[in-house]
Image (tube, grey):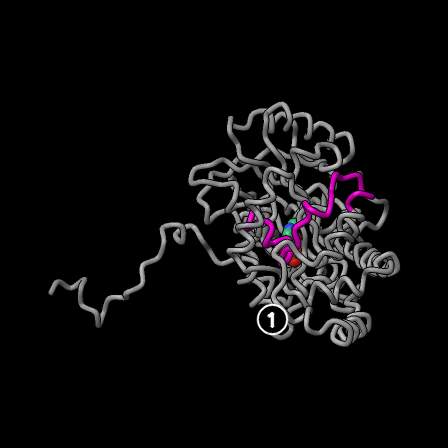
Amino acid sequence: MTPSQDTTTTSPWHLAQRCARMNPSVIREILKLTELPGVRSLAGGLPSADTFPVEAMRDAAARVLADTPREALQYAASEGFGPLREWVSAQMTAAGLDAPAERILITNGSQQGLDLIGKVMLDEGSTVAVETPTYLGALQAFTPNQPVFAAVECDRDGPLADGIARLPRGTRFMYVLPNFQNPTGRVVPAARRDEIVAAAQRAGVPLVEDNPYGDLWYDQAPPRPLASRWAEGTLYLGSFSKVLAPGLRLGYMVCPQPLFSKVLQAKQAADLHTGSFTQRVVHQVIRDGFLAQHIPTIRDRYRVQRDAMAAALRAHLPAGSEWQAPSGGMFFWVRLPEGCDAMALLPKAVEAGVAYVPGAAFFAENADVRTLRLSFVTLAPADIEDAVAKLGGVLKTHLADRSPVAA
Ligand code: PMP
């Protein structure tokens, strides 16, 4: 018997090659650190639990169990609960999309939408275009399909049309977050949206538009979606995570007709369907205009926190740090002065009692180690001030230690 056949020491399990490229999310690893006592976390991408509509959910759950218990607890259609698809269709049509209910797919969060798109659209070696930087969870969702990422150059207004024009022929799609991007917080202005769509059309590259943050605007509503500018070439993803609660795991996709049946088959294979009970409860909550009252209360809360963080950054970050106050969403994106590596500095920050997400994880290539992402929605304004003061202290000490001592 050769040593490799020794069943007492050799595992019988063999992993697929694709696992070599799967990594634990850096963010999830960091979140563990942030749970240490005494650490104020600016790291998580979690909405504030104070915004969850607990009463409305409780009432709706009771109502669904009273009125339709057998249906709510039974297997159901893979496409999703009909009235919820109708509701999404009406909302999306009002937003300018070509979104009949037959092409709405209800998903387990928009994260599942990303996974399904990867399965249906990507082969090993396919090119998928992403922004620089982009949402880490999308990189994670696409990676098992073994694509090649093409990072499109971006400025403060989002992806540059020239970068799209230079994409390799046959690029399967470009993944874009036009509203209050995770991680940069940037919003793509209307004129740039037109340029992106025109460049993508010329290059023959369809778009996957991910919009979990669009309703969280604090100054003015964002311009209309890319999908309203190029219906047949844009697949649109929406989510209830930021406007109701992420634990529901409820999102949706407006799927161009040629893709719908394949995405649906992938959904069937993945989980048969999104939870019937959850879909019915959420539909019960939102059916009569609940979100029109609820979302402004979230905006009012987050706006105050956004302003608190902007003031704290101005007061405490060392000279040479750069950021732009976001007009919506949940994040500030900061670029530290030269000589600061956000990943290397994180242990010192945690020791000082503050955590953040180093920006490097959000780059498909050529990571900028000076960047970091700060969430402003989980801490109260006074705690934001305290956390940013601690961060500023760590950075200033680091910069002072490395500057040459005057003779
Ligand atoms: N896309 C982006 C840009 C996100 O930030 C998130 C959540 N962090 C998701 C998708 C996934 O959201 P959901 O809860 O709908 O799966």
In terms of depth relative to the viewer, which is nearer, 57 or 48?
Answer: 57
* Residue 147, above or below 395: above
* Residue 126, above or below 376: above
Residue at coordinates 52% horizontally, 41% vertically from top-left? 121
The percent position of residue 104, horizontal first and vertical second, equals 68, 48
The percent position of residue 210, horizontal first and vertical second, equals 67, 45
The percent position of residue 203, horizontal first and vertical second, equals 59, 25
Residue at coordinates 28% horizontally, 66% vertically from top-left? 11
Residue farthest toward the right in the current orientation of the protein? 293
The percent position of residue 23, horizontal first and vertical second, equals 46, 55
Q: Secondary structure at mark 1?
A: loop
Residue 114 left/right relative to 98: left
The answer, for residue 182, to whether it is visible in the render is no
Location of the N terminus by quadrant is bottom left
Does the closest atom of ligand 1 sit within 8 Å of the Cβ of label 1? Answer: no
Q: Quadrant of ligand 1?
A: bottom right
Count of numbered circles on the image: 1
* Residue under label 1: 35
Mark 1 neighbour density, 10 Å: few (under 14) some (14–19) many (20 or more): few
Q: Amino acid at mark 1?
A: Glu
Residue 189 left/right relative to 167: right
Residue farthest toward the top in the current orientation of the protein? 202
In terms of depth relative to the viewer, which is nearer, 316 or 401?
Answer: 316
Residue at coordinates 31% horizontally, 63% vertically from top-left? 13
Residue at coordinates 73% horizontally, 65% vertically from top-left? 280
The answer, for residue 330, to whether it is visible in the render is yes
Whether residue 186 appears in magenta in the rendering, the answer is no
Q: State the image quarter where residue 177 is shown.
A: top right
Q: Which residues are magenta?
A: 92-116
